[in-house]
Amino acid sequence: MKILVTGGLGYIGSHTVVELQNSNIEVVIVDNLSNSKIEVLDKITEITGNKPEYHNFDLSDKESCSKFFNENSNIDGIIHFAAYKAVGESVSKPLTYYRNNLESLMNIMDNMNSNGIHNLVFSSSCTVYGQPDILPVTEKAPRKQAESPYGNTKKMAEDIIQDTIYASDLKGIALRYFNPVGAHPTALIGELPLGVPNNLMPFITQTAAGIREQLSVFGDDYNTTDGTAIRDYIHVVDLAKAHVIAVQRLVKKNNKLNYEVFNLGTGNGLSVLDVIKSFEKITNKKLNYKIVGRREGDIEKVWANTDFANQELGWKAKQGIDDMTASAWKFQLTL
Ligand code: UFG
């Protein structure tokens, strides 16, 4: 089996490449290094003992994309990660986000159609649910108005995939991630945020490492147990493993519908203070943080109902928050 992983040098992409290779699946990576580093290729090779084939070009460039697929039509499936993902930046540069995230997807699907590649796994997000009315949220919950152009690209991409599948013989799985955190147990790969991190876990580890002075906890007046917002944090290695299962499901024709959607979370909601407590316990360090006002666009609480993924994919997240904070910290110490 040969799988194309777009964005395969990025955070979730690189962990997925490792898990694919560990399952003896041949991997081709396309990544234009817009938010990743070429060194990750060597780290993947160090972990698995196997250097994946690598191509550097922009998937939103139609010609480069067609050229690649014309020369590489022997691909059994695609896991499409490559996309811009900074929520705040998407608000100030909407066209950059729509163009990059949607044109690359459409170029890929055009070339799948013309090259007889039928199987697509797409990297979606729980952001499509907004603030759900019922928790834990199931895949059947209505998708809400996106909070940002980034979130809207995920929602629109799901629609583009669903409509294209309906009109062709393509098959697809959209995986809606909750909050991926943590790093590979070897600490050779992990999250490498550019500049000041937006997300909680890298901000925590950078603060503890002395790179940031203080963590701001955004809001303690939410309607939650301790007043801070609740998310479903999932270990990136658990998440990566679900991709291997999803792409095999399509290639082996075990899918029940041509377009399927799965939540990837642990099913446990944790507050910001819960994550900080885990970090302090695991590292034996006091974290410098202060409570500040709410962050614009944040939702109060969300966690996944994972029954469908557990039953249909035979997959379950195994690692808890302490594994996540410990591995994130171990990786931070290598930087
Ligand atoms: N938080 C802080 N301080 C920080 C950073 C985050 O208190 O410095 C809080 C947030 O307010 C939130 C929680 O930690 O309550 C998690 O925040 P993240 O930024 O790590 O994650 P989000 O849930 O905001 O982001 C996720 C995905 C995005 C997606 C977004 C949609 O990472 O891809 O949900 O809401 F777009």
Image (cartoon, rainbow, N blue to C red):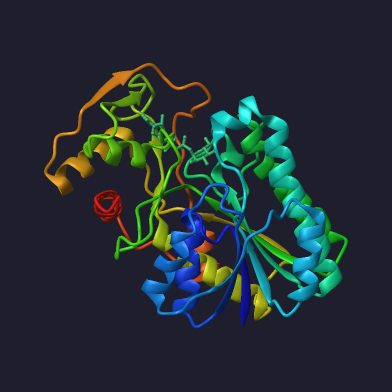
Quadrant assignment for ligand 1: top left
Residue 190, by quadrant, is bottom left
Question: Up-down: is 133 above or below 4?
Answer: above
Identify the residue shown where x is 26% and y is 34%: 207
**Is residue 255 visible to us here?**
no
Q: Nearer the viewer, residue 64 or 128?
A: 64
Count of numbered marks: 0
Viewport quadrant of the N terminus: bottom right
Left or right side of 251 for 241: left
Q: Please provide percent x and percent y for residue 314.
A: 49, 71
Residue 189, by quadrant, is bottom left
Q: Please provide percent x and percent y for residue 165.
A: 80, 61
Q: Please provide percent x and percent y for residue 144.
A: 65, 34
Left or right side of 267 for 128: right
**Is residue 177 visible to us here?**
yes
Q: Please provide percent x and percent y for residue 133.
A: 55, 34
Identify the residue shown where x is 27% and y is 54%: 334
Residue 228, by quadrant, is top left
Residue positioned most to the left: 284
Identify the residue shown where x is 30% and y is 30%: 225
